[in-house]
Structures are given as structure tokens and as C-alpha cells.
Image (tube, grey):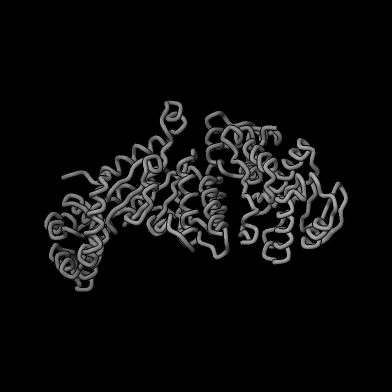
Amino acid sequence: MNDQPVFRKELEEYMDAALPILYVDTLENGKVQDILADVAKKKGRSVVSWSMHSGYVEEGGGYPTDLCGALASVLREQNFTRKILVLEDVAGELESPAIVSRLRCIAERIVRSELEDCTVVLIAPLISIPRALEPYITLMNLDYLSQEKIKEHILDFVQNNYIQAPNEELLEQFAMHLRGLTETELDNILALTTSDDRELNQKDLRTILRQKQQIIKKSGILEMVTVKETVEDIGGLQNLKDWLRTKAQIFRDVRRAKAFGVDIPKGVLIAGMPGCGKSLTAKAAASMFKVPLLRMDMGRLMGKYVGESEANMRRALQLTEASSPCVLWIDELEKAFAGAGAQGGSSEVTTRLFGSFLTWMQEKDSLAFVVATANNISHLPPELMRKGRFDEIFYVDFPNQSEREKIISLHIGKRRSADLAKIDVAALARKMKGYCGADIESVVRDGVEAAFVAGKAHVTTEDLQAAIGRTHPISETMKDAIEEMDKTYKSKKFTNASREE
């Protein structure tokens, strides 16, 4: 059988190495049980199982019991040689000190070869790992279905349900959009998309997106952001916008690009001054790529139990894979991974999260484009900025004269487009040197509001100049921090997001 080849290989290696407890983080219990039965037969072992609904079962017979009693019976047995003890539905059970103690005793006896050729396999979604069991547990995940396997699964589904198979191009699109899902989720979505008209067509891709949104919402780990912004809402940053347009073109026609030898775009790190359009660019990128935008909030990932944060990170990356093609936006990256590599407490957790993220960035081949934004990168681990992690790193400075003019025009145009022709935009831009995009928007908003309150029919240049006088830009309020950031970015020689005037 070629099903789950990597998972099978690891399972056999871990059993041969006598690792005592294997924890399979999954909801696909049936698939894991089938693979275990196959591996057990190959290695001449027998499977003993416990689940909440069936109790303790051995060699086809059994009796209902609680997990604590089942583990006690294992410890009492004189001969438990060459057996695989499979425990399902255990996530909540691992909060019991008695159960943890019995599992630890079994693990120790396996390590000391008192239980020869034995393995304990836990099958459950990973919530947390008790500290007492950490040295004995090895985490495992089922393989992602490859795009070719997904295509085979779709063709099997349509054949079994007497539905006309989609053409090759549409089949490729379905396989790409269904990446990262379990076989159960695949079957559910395919059943839903064919329930109305008994066929797979272009409009069903929207149904897949809606179902992926459901998966994201239920997780509570990632947020799916509704995008209204486009690249036209960004004033300036022309180098960055041109670069994103190139990547978007590859992204939208990835099959031909790969056939031509083009690498799949990985992502971009946009670093620089606060309020200068980094977050706006992340949203515009999703619009440009014509894919959903997912936002990763590190605060949601951090858990209070041992192993919970790492499990949340794995789940977040799995959800990202499942939602591809997509843009994954990690806002304020410096808050997420600052302190990685330090010793003790939360720093060690951050280091493990950072390691998981780096490995994923290096190895991923999915259509998940990462847009990471950061204000201050001085405390970020240098490994993050090594070539191969991101396709490019851009530096966003305060807008220059022409960019300030574009930003002013954009914000006036949104609010008072009829007044724009009579306003001296160039003069306003000269007075706003050192203002970030957010400062400029604040000036326009304040000027329009003041003109309305004063009962004026139009907004004038003078109204906006008065608003400038009432505004203290971030370059003044955070002068020391801004100067320090400016030195750091200039020393790093990052690509400038703006074109030189």
C-alpha cells in the first residue's frame, strides 16, 4: 500500500527503535487504525486497543472499562510482548494524574525492555502533553495528500457516484484548492458541491472557499480577513508593488510557471517605519493574488499548558496549507519571535515556535504566500532574514514628496473628490515631510471634519494647513526610536520599497 508512505515509514522506524509512546495528532482515527493493523501484521505484532465507546479490547474480545482500569490491567499482565497498545479519545484523559502515572510506568517498562517490542500509540487531536510524559512521547502527523493523490480521490469520488469527471484543467484547479484537507473533509466537500446539480464545475470552487472559511473559524487560531483594499489604495511603494505584481502573475498561473521552471513564491518581509502602509500592502497583496487573506495572531497561539503553543502553531500551519492558495499575513513579526534563542520560560516556547515556523517556510511547497510585516527588526533572530526564508525583504521609509502627494490625493479623493482640483496638494506635501501615511490620513480627516463643523461648502488648502499645525507626526512623537530604526534599516541594505525621486 502506498497510502501515507512517510507516516508509515516513520511509524515502523519508531517501533523498531522502541520509542515507548507515539502521539498521532489527528481526527482520522479510522485511517490510523488501518495503518497500524497493516504495520502490526507486517511486523508480527498484535493490536490491543482502548476507546471511550468500546473499552479495552484484545484479540477480538474485550470488556468495557475506564482508561485507568485498562492501563492497570496492562501493568498487571505477565506477558505483554510484541503488542501495540492503541488509545483513542485520550486528550481529556491526560489531565488525570492516575492515568499519567500509569502511562509513565508503562513507558518506563518499555524503555527498560521489560515490555519487549511494545509501543503505546495515542490517537487524538493534540491539546497538551503532561510534563511527566514529555520524555517518552514522540509526536506524529499523517501525511498531506499530494495534488496527484487528491486528483485520484476526486476521480474515484465521481466514478463511485456516477458523476461526469471534470476536464483536466478544472480537475487541476480542484486539486489545488483542496490541498491540506483530510480525506473525510474532502469527501464532505465533494458531496456538498455535487448535491445540487450532480457535477463539479467552476462555481463549486466558491463553495470550497466557504467551507475552508468554516474550518478557519472553528479553529479559533487564525482569522480570515475580509479584504476591500486594492493596490490602488497604496500611495507610492512602487518597487514593492511592481514586485508583488510579478509574484501575483506567477501565483495565478502556477501550473505553467512550474512547468517552465519557475519556483513557487514563498513570501515577503516588509519592514520599516510604523504607519507607512505595511499592513495595507498585506491586504492589497491578497486582492492582487485573488486569494483569501489569513491573519496569524501570536496571542491566539500561546497556550497555558505544556506543548499547547507548539500544537497551536502546527495547527495554524496545517490550516494555512488547507486554505491554500492564500496569503498568510503575520503582523508585527518582531512581537511574535523576539526573544527566540534565549533561555528559560516563555523564551524557550518562542524558540520552539520559531523553529517550527522556519522549517515550514523552508520546506513548504504549497500556494501559501507569507506576508510578514515588522516595525523593529533589531531583536529578530538573524536566521529569519537569511536567503531562502523569504523571496525578498523590503524596507518602507517615510513617504517622499511624490508619494506624499499621492497619499494626500487618495484621502481627499475618498472624502471630497469635488474639492481636490482646487487644493494645492504639492504645497501640503512639502509641509508634511516626515509624516507617515497614517499621519497624512489623520490630517485630511481632521481638515474635512473642521470644515464641516465650521459650516463651509468646500474643503480648502487652508483648512488642511490648519490641520497640519494641529498634528504631531510619529517622527516627532517617537523621534529617538525612529532614528534608531532608520540606522538599523540603512545598515541592513534591504531593498527600498519606494522608487528614488
Q: Which percent across, then down, holds residue 331?
A: 39, 56
Q: Which residue is drawn at 29% across and 40% down?
A: 242
Q: Which percent across, then down, holds residue 68?
A: 77, 62
Q: Which percent across, then down, holds residue 90?
A: 70, 58
Q: Which of 499 and 111 is in front in this view?
A: 111
Q: Which residue is drawn at 21% across and 53% down?
A: 399
Q: How many marks?
A: 0
The N terminus appears in which quarter of the rendering?
top right
Q: Quadrant of residue 153?
A: top right
Would you say residue 283 is visible in this rendering?
A: no
Q: Which of 370 and 218 is in front in this view?
A: 370
As drawn, which residue projects farthest toward the top? Answer: 260
Q: Is residue 57 left or right of residue 276?
A: right
Q: Which residue is drawn at 55% across and 41% down?
A: 179
Q: Nearer the viewer, residue 17 or 363?
A: 17
The C terminus appears in which quarter of the rendering?
top left
Q: Quadrant of residue 39?
A: top right
Q: Nearer the viewer, residue 499 or 412?
A: 499
